[in-house]
Amino acid sequence: MPKIEKEIKILDINVDEIKQLLQGLGAEYKGKKDQKIYVYDVPTLFYRFLEIRELLNSNNQLIIETNLNKLELLLQEYIDLESDEELKKEKKLFELEDLMDIVRLDINNIRKILNNAILENNFKKYMINPNKWIRLRKSNEKIELTIKHVLNKKNNKYQNVLETEITVSSFEEANNLLENMGIYKRNYQEKIRYSYVYKDAQIEIDIWPLLEPYLEIECDNENTIKELLEKLNLKEKEIVSINTESLYKRKNIDILKMSTLKF
C-alpha cells in the first residue's frame, strides 16, 4: 500500500560529528549502504491525458472503466501540480466543486470536458512530472523498486512523499522488465548512505557525488523531528524540504541531463 512520509533534509553536515551524536542518543545503527540506482520517468502527464481521452471514446465498457481509473489518478497528480488560481478557473468553467468530480460525471460530459481546449493546454504544460519518478535501487544486497511522488500541496514545512515500494530479486532483471514495458531508464546514480533508527524516525546520512553530505529525517511524528534537530545541534543548519535534484540545481548541475552520476 502507498504510504505518505514527512521528510526534511539538513544540509552540509559534519558526518563524524553526527554519527557520534546519534550514538550518544542511543539511535540504532542499521549499517552502511553502497547504493546503485536506476531512475526512470513516469510517462508524461500530457500524453497520458491524450491517451485516456482517446480511449474514453471507446464503446467497450471495460476499456471505459479502466481509463476512468487512470483519469482519477491523473487528475490527482494534475491538481497537486497546478496553481490554485488556475484550478479555480477550471472549476468555474466546468461548474464543479472539485475537479476530481469529473470522474463522477456521465461519460458524455466527461468526454466534453476532456475535449476542452483550455484543459488540454493546461495539461500540455506538464510533460514529465518532476515530482514523480520510478527508482530501482540496490542497497548492498537488498533491491527495491519504488514509485516516489512528492506532494506539493500537503504541507509547506515538510516534504510529503507518497511511496509505493516492493522488493525484487534481481537488479538487472527488474531493469529489463521495465525497459520491455517501454519505461527506459533516465540515468544511473551511485551514493553512500549510513542508516539509523531513533524512536519512530528513519535517519539517513547521504553522500552523493559533487554534493556536501546531508542528513535526511523521515518521520510522521513532528515532535520526534523537532527533538532530533535539537539534540543533534542542527537547528542553526539549513533545513530544506526539496529533492536531491533541486540540491544539484543549486550548484548549476542538471542531473536530468546526466546519464551517469557516480564517484
Image (cartoon, helix red, strand yellow):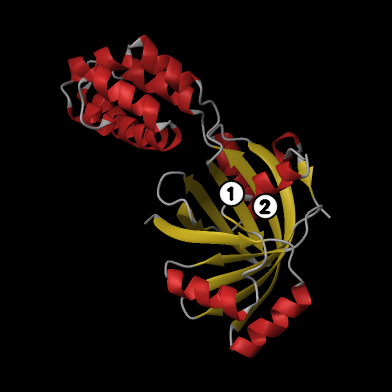
Q: Identify which amino acid the numbered label 1 is placed on.
A: Arg
Task: Say which element carries label 2.
Answer: strand
Q: Is residue 110 visible?
A: no
Q: Residue furthest front?
A: 236
Provide residue 85's location: percent of width, then percent of height: 38, 28
Q: Nearer the viewer, residue 28 or 227?
A: 227
Residue farthest to the left, as pictured? 106
Q: Residue 116 appears at what percent x and percent y?
A: 33, 11
Q: Amino acid at mark 2?
A: Ile
Q: Is residue 114 positioned above or below 101 on the image?
A: above
Name the residue at 74% across, 34% down: 257
Q: Position of residue 31 (x, y in %)?
A: 67, 77
Say whether marks 1 and 2 touch (CB < 8 Å).
Answer: yes
Secondary structure at badge 1 equals strand
The residue at which mark 1 appears reads as 135
On the rendered image, what quadrant is the N terminus found in?
A: bottom left
Q: Residue at x 74, y 55 (%)?
A: 190
At 56% across and 58% down in the image, what residue appears? Answer: 144
Quarter of the image with the C terminus is bottom right
